[in-house]
């Protein structure tokens, strides 16, 4: 992990080293800077992963960890870039009257300049670097220059395939915002609401289905479909609503994914996913069909199709999915210190699964690295006559 200046990470949380100290990191054994709450939290993976790497230096039993930080980059499988890009976007993307560029853009430019000058980046062309950009709008300016790196993202909704794709990059879960359902003793009969959705209804891009479904479902007596936000006790109301519902809608919005899926998992409310382009965390080891219902958008917006499908899922089938939700919920919990098979460790497992492919790409790129270009070896090329073809 690069020892980047605090302005790229904990400095964004208003942390400063003590006077006279040259450390760029807080001493997490005595004080951990807090991450801002509200919707900021949903993209806070940068915070949890960085904390976990810092903690690995103090771990008494490093063999039990998925990753450890090493000081010599030649010993590292991957190079971690600790830029809190989502927080930078959320807090500093607006331009103040006295600025030409936002602080978010300034930091991205500084990051690109720093990384591309490092011997580690030059050695691999950036292929073995990890860059976090979980908020869909984070790293907007730098992503085109840092694309060889492995991105950790929420989805691929705002990326061209040549910049980000499932072969190269890792999809990480959002941190759920609503309260976990602790000691859940509910059942099919006690959850009175059949289908629940609360959020922004009118969205652009792929989110047109929300508006269509609102008109199709708003008059169903056991369906809750309404506008909602985090303001005015919105989180508590959403928690109560999801905890008392059998199924929770996860519909594509401005991007294919949303925090709503992970709120539903934390609520043990069976997710109904209507998002044709969604990519899901850990899907190489997790079968989402065991605890989610997937519906194509073209089917979902047909009159009565969705509500009839949901009503056809009876108590026994629902209970199996509900029990599976309770089983897999810990895989989506972010915490410090991290624990085996929590969200932090699962993301690291996903990252680790890419290492072999990255090493192969890097090794292939070095095949001719020991040979100077042809012109430097004193060879000349023979011009091709214009009429050769």
Image (spheres, helix red, strand yellow):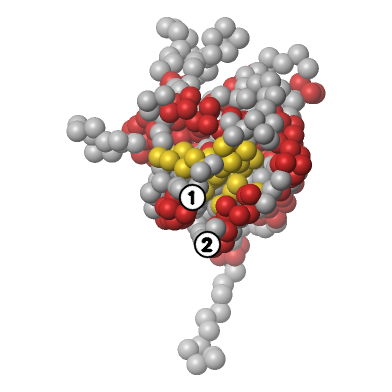
Q: CA distance from mark 1 to mark 2?
A: 11 Å
Q: Position of residue 43 (x, y in %)?
A: 50, 33
Write down the residue under mark 1.
217
Residue in view at x 68 percent, y 14 percent: 58
Q: Position of residue 327 (x, y in %)?
A: 74, 32
Image position of 389 (left or right of 91): right
Q: Residue furthest front?
A: 221
In the rendered image, which quarter contains the N terminus? Answer: top right
Asked whether 89 or 371 is in front, the reply is: 89
Instruction: Please tell me the numbered disc located at residue 345.
Output: none
Say whether residue 8 is visible. Answer: no
Q: How many marks?
A: 2
**Vertical order, 290 against 365 (above or below):** above
In the rendered image, which quarter contains the C terminus? Answer: bottom right
Residue in view at x 43 percent, y 14 percent: 16
Asked whether 235 or 379 is in front, the reply is: 235
**Vertical order, 177 against 366 (above or below):** above
Q: Mark 1 vs mark 2: which is more N-terminal?
A: 1
Q: Secondary structure at mark 1?
A: helix
**How dense is the environment of label 1, judged by Cα within 10 Å: few (below 14), some, or many (20 and up)?**
some
Write down the residue under mark 2.
302
Q: Secondary structure at mark 2?
A: loop
Residue in view at x 62 percent, y 22 percent: 335
Q: Position of residue 372 (x, y in %)?
A: 61, 57
């Amino acid at each position: 992990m690069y020892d980047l200046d605090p302005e790229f990470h904990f400095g964004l949380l208003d942390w400063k080293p003590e006077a006279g100290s040259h450390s760029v990191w807080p001493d997490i054994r005595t004080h951990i800077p807090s991450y801002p709450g509200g919707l900021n939290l949903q993209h806070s993976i940068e915070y949890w992963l960085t904390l976990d790497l810092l903690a690995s230096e103090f771990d008494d039993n490093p063999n039990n960890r998925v990753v450890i930080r090493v000081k010599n980059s030649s010993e590292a499988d991957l190079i971690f870039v600790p830029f809190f890009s989502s927080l930078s976007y959320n807090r500093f993307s607006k331009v103040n009257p006295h600025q030409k560029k936002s602080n978010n853009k300034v930091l991205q430019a500084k990051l690109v300049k720093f990384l591309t000058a490092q011997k580690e980046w030059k050695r691999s062309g950036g292929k073995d670097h990890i860059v976090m950009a979980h908020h869909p709008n984070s790293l907007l300016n730098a992503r085109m220059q840092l694309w060889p790196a492995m991105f950790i993202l929420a989805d691929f909704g705002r990326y061209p395939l040549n910049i980000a794709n499932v072969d190269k990059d890792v999809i990480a879960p959002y941190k759920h915002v609503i309260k976990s359902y602790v000691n859940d003793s509910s059942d099919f009969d006690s959850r009175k609401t059949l289908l629940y959705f609360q959020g922004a209804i009118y969205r652009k891009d792929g989110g047109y289905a929300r508006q269509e479904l609102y008109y199709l479902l708003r008059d169903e007596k056991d369906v809750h479909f309404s506008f909602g936000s985090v303001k005015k006790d919105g989180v508590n109301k959403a928690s109560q609503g999801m905890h008392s519902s059998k199924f929770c809608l996860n519909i594509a919005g401005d991007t294919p994914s949303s925090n709503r899926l992970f709120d539903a998992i934390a609520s043990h409310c069976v997710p109904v996913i209507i998002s044709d382009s969604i990519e899901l965390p850990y899907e190489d080891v997790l079968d989402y069909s065991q605890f989610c219902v997937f519906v194509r958008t073209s089917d979902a917006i047909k009159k009565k199709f969705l509500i009839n499908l949901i009503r056809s899922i009876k108590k026994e089938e629902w209970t199996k999915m509900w029990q599976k939700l309770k089983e897999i919920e810990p895989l989506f919990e972010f915490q410090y210190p991290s624990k085996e098979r929590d969200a932090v460790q699962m993301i690291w497992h996903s990252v680790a699964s890419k290492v072999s492919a990255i090493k192969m790409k890097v090794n292939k790129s070095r095949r001719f690295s020991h040979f100077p270009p042809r012109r430097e070896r004193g060879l000349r090329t023979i011009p091709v006559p214009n009429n050769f073809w």
